[in-house]
């Protein structure tokens, strides 16, 4: 693990700054919308703009990187996201905020794509699983830590927006310094969503509902706490508890899914998440400890569902199909994430604070019911047939799918192959190839070999080559490597 971190430590540091800024800006915009007296339905579509932008960015940025290059795209998108957050306190208008949220989502998708591409370039078949685990930990802990930054200044002022801009700018420094060479980039292959659904109806359908849950609590969690008259400090604690729960529960749930039918685990986890989130509807803002505990449990059950859906779908795909199918899975998650804040916002305006917990509970209950129904439709994979669970984050793009150790092995780059050949190549004395018959003292002399010096020199004159016939003698080396 240490060697994997050491090989890309600057990229991980840059990603940590990006996650801090992302965690802070999401909750900050939602809280500021309440201060500006936007209704929850309006706040819902503003917050949904980020997820729409993220989905759009994951589609268009790969081709942009392939055409323009990593460094230019990363610098441009970092500047764009740093600028977009500063527009919010200047122009208090829902449509302007919606546009900036879309821009922010597109920019963050591009930042993740470039970083993941560099990580892929640094990874080997032995270290890519470790890199993915580090990436997952940084994502969850960075988003959780970003919530605590809400306590630095009042969201009603402009300082916190400046802090987000500074964090994004700081992320550029280690990432670009570490980019010693620009890796080759190819846009990820795509698999038709219908094909993915046919391979795993549960995995694909549940991914949409997982997007609803994540979009709802990430986008409208602060609006929920505002309805409960909770302070900014209490809001940051509750939002942090969601990510901490996901960090704590993901690995144990993953190990459980490797030991039994994965559909059963999806059913149990989704049902437990529905109970935990639904229970939040019965507690008020003055019962902080109970809400923190339930938020931790909700995150602990909701966030691993993303990885469970991917693992279950991959059980029905070949290694080559896994990377191609990831784009369709992320698309399904994005559709749900766009709908989540809008549904939760309408629920908060309609029935008050319980609107968000009931939205979460309904989505996870639907996952559990659909999992139970699918278990009746066809037999599941045996434990031996199931692939290993790999923790994934919802912030990851299809580019990160290559880091999944269950997917197709990474091909060795041409540069690495040349270095390997050079290291293994053995030369005989006088810098001649060891298997050159002309250098073998035990070889029989060629009776046709000329002895006159002029005739000897004539052997090296250019002669026409018959491409239809293989040469009778071994080809002479045109150049010799430099002597040490």
Image: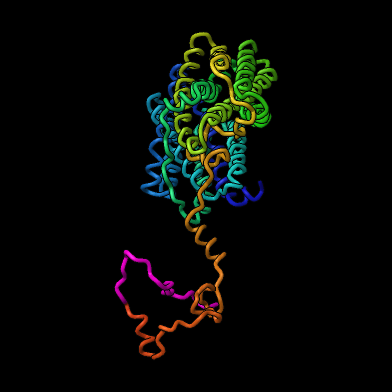
- Our reading of the magenta stretch's main secondary structure is loop
Vertical comparison of 385 with 67: above or below: above
The residue at 43%/47% (across/down) is 185
Residue 469 in magenta stretch: yes
Front in this rendered view, residue 20 or 128: 128
Q: Residue furthest front?
A: 447
Q: Which residues are magenta?
A: 463-484
Q: Quadrant of the C terminus?
A: bottom right
Residue 184 in magenta stretch: no
Front in this rendered view, residue 334 or 483: 483
- Asked whether residue 83 appears in the rendered view, the answer is no
Number of marks drawn: 0
- Asked whether residue 447 appears in the rendered view, the answer is yes
Q: Residue furthest left?
A: 464
Q: Residue furthest right?
A: 289
Vertical comparison of 306 with 363: above or below: below
Colouring used for the render: rainbow
> In the image, residue 31 lies at what x, y percent?
52, 24
In the figure, is residue 361 to the left or right of 251? Answer: left
Quadrant in the picture for residue 287? top right
> In the image, residue 65 lies at what x, y percent?
40, 45
In the figure, is residue 416 to the left or right of 300? Answer: left
Front in this rendered view, residue 228 or 402: 402
Quadrant in the picture for residue 231? top right
The residue at 70%/20% (across/down) is 289
Front in this rendered view, residue 299 or 405: 405
> In the image, residue 270 lies at what x, y percent?
60, 19
> In the image, residue 428 lies at what x, y percent?
55, 75
Q: Residue furthest top?
A: 351
């Amino acid at each position: 693990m240490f060697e994997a971190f050491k090989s890309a430590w600057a990229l991980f540091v840059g990603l940590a700054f990006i996650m801090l800024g992302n965690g802070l800006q999401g909750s900050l915009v939602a809280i500021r919308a309440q201060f500006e007296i936007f209704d929850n339905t309006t706040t819902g579509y503003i917050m949904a703009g980020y997820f729409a932008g993220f989905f759009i960015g994951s589609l268009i940025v790969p081709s942009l990187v392939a055409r323009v290059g990593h460094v230019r795209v990363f610098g441009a998108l970092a500047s764009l996201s740093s600028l977009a957050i500063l527009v919010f306190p200047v122009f208090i208008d829902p449509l302007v905020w919606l546009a900036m949220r879309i821009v922010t989502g597109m920019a963050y998708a591009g930042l993740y794509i470039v970083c993941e591409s560099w990580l892929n370039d640094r990874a080997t078949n032995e270290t890519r699983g470790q890199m993915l685990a580090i990436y997952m930990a940084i994502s969850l802990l960075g988003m959780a830590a970003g919530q605590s930054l809400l306590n630095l200044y009042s969201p009603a002022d402009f300082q916190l927006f400046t802090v987000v801009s500074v964090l994004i700018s700081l992320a550029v420094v280690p990432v670009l310094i570490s980019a010693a060479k620009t890796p080759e980039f190819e846009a990820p292959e795509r698999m038709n969503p219908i094909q993915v659904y046919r391979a795993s109806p549960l995995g694909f359908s549940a991914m949409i509902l997982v997007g609803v849950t994540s979009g709802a609590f990430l986008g409208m969690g602060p609006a929920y706490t505002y309805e409960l008259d909770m302070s900014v400090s209490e809001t940051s604690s509750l939002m942090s508890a969601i990510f901490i729960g996901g960090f704590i529960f993901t690995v144990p749930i993953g190990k459980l899914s490797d030991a039994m039918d994965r559909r059963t685990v999806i059913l149990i986890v989704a049902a437990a998440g529905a109970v935990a989130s639904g229970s939040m509807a019965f507690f008020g803002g003055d019962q902080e400890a109970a809400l923190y505990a339930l938020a931790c449990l909700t995150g602990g059950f909701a966030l691993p569902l993303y990885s469970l859906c991917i693992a279950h779908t991959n059980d029905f795909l070949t290694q080559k199909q896994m990377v191609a199918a990831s784009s369709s899975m992320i698309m399904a998650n994005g559709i749900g994430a766009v709908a989540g804040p809008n549904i939760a916002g309408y629920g908060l305006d309609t029935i008050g604070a319980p609107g968000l917990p009931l939205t979460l509970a309904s989505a996870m209950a639907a996952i559990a019911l659909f999992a139970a129904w699918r278990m009746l439709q066809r037999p599941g994979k045996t434990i031996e047939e199931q692939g290993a669970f790999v923790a994934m984050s919802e912030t990851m793009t299809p580019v990160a799918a290559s880091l999944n150790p269950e997917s197709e092995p990474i091909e060795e780059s041409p540069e690495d192959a040349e270095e390997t050949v050079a290291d293994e190549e053995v030369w005989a004395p006088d810098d001649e190839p060891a298997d050159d018959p002309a250098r073998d003292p035990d070889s029989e002399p060629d009776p046709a070999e000329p002895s006159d010096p002029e005739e000897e020199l004539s052997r090296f004159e250019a002669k026409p080559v018959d491409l239809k016939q293989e040469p009778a003698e071994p080809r002479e080396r045109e150049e010799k490597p430099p002597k040490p």
